[in-house]
Amino acid sequence: ESSKFTLYDPTGKIIAGNLDEIHYATAETPSFSPHSPSPPSLLKIRKGQKWGYLTVKGRVISEPQWDHPANFSDGFAVVSKNNDDTILAESGEARGFPEYQISPINNGLFRVIEKKSQKVGYLAKDGKLQVPCEWDFDSKNAWTDRVIVSRAGKFGIIDLTGQIICPPVWDDIDDLNHKDRLLVSRDGLTGLANLKGELLGDLKWQKIHDFEDGLAPALTDNSFSLIDQNGVIVITHPW
């Protein structure tokens, strides 16, 4: 028979008993230890096959009823029951969204996939749809204020209110190690762009590598060049 656990408060009063598992409900400190010098204030507990949440002082956030454990972040956890997702607040408020598959909160928003359309959008903390579910793909908050998205095979950029910064006109958009520059491509050729998706220099390269000391190696079929952050060729050599 497996061991059972009981939680007590400092006075010896039982907080919760007959538990099968106890963990801290934060990603930063997943392993429970009663001797931790600065333990997180939230716990996730398993009773039978169901998971619930409570504070280390014994306040019940949610009775064990959820199918899978999840951690809290920014005051919220995404839990599920019978394949339907719910956003659970530390206050205990639970808002169910059976129409969405919901990812944990990131940059103050929940990434969602609408089950019916399989399109991507974003929910705000108040449960309102901040970015409509109209995108085929997203970069899952690559930055704190904008996202690479795609529709009908073309890539663009939106901000986290859903406003389009760059319409979906590129075959691909990718990150570089330069904080203010992106790679964009169309018809097999690559170029450098700013964070608005605007082309800098020429769209003529087979490949552009990461920047080092302000310059990035850029290749064509018959040359090797170094370009600056504005896409201007500084040095070029034929193969």
Image: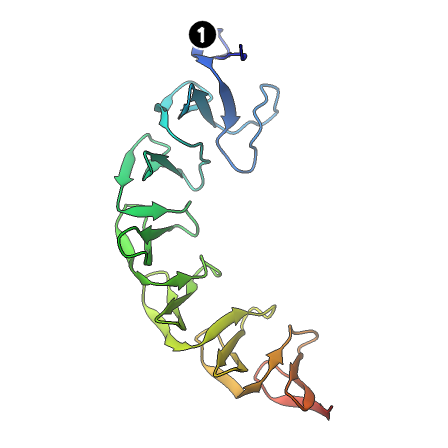
Where residue 122 sits, quadrant-wise, is bottom left
Q: Residue at x 47, y 26 (%)?
A: 43
Viewer-proximal residue among 86 and 222: 222
Tell me where residue 194 appears, x and y as whole percent.
49, 77
User: Quick one: SS at disc 1?
Assistant: loop
Residue in the foreground of this view, choosing between 100 and 92: 100
Residue carrying label 1: 13
How packed mark 1 is, by other alpha carbons closer than 10 Å (few <14, some 14-19, many 20 or more), is: few
Residue depicted at 45% across the width and 76% down the height: 171
> Residue 101 at what x, y percent from top left?
34, 47
Corner quadrant of residue 135: bottom left
In this rendering, the answer to whether 205 lies above or below 145 is: below
Q: In what quadrant of the picture does the C terminus appear?
A: bottom right
Q: Nearer the viewer, residue 132 or 213?
A: 132
Q: Residue furthest bottom?
A: 238
Relative placement, left or right, of 138 versus 215 is: left
Q: Is residue 41 above or below residue 10?
A: below
Looking at this rendering, what residue extends furthest in the top direction? 12
Residue 120 image offset from top left, x and y in percent: 34, 57
Determine whether 146 is above or below 12 in the image: below
Residue 82: image x %, image y %? 32, 34
Residue type at tag 1: Lys
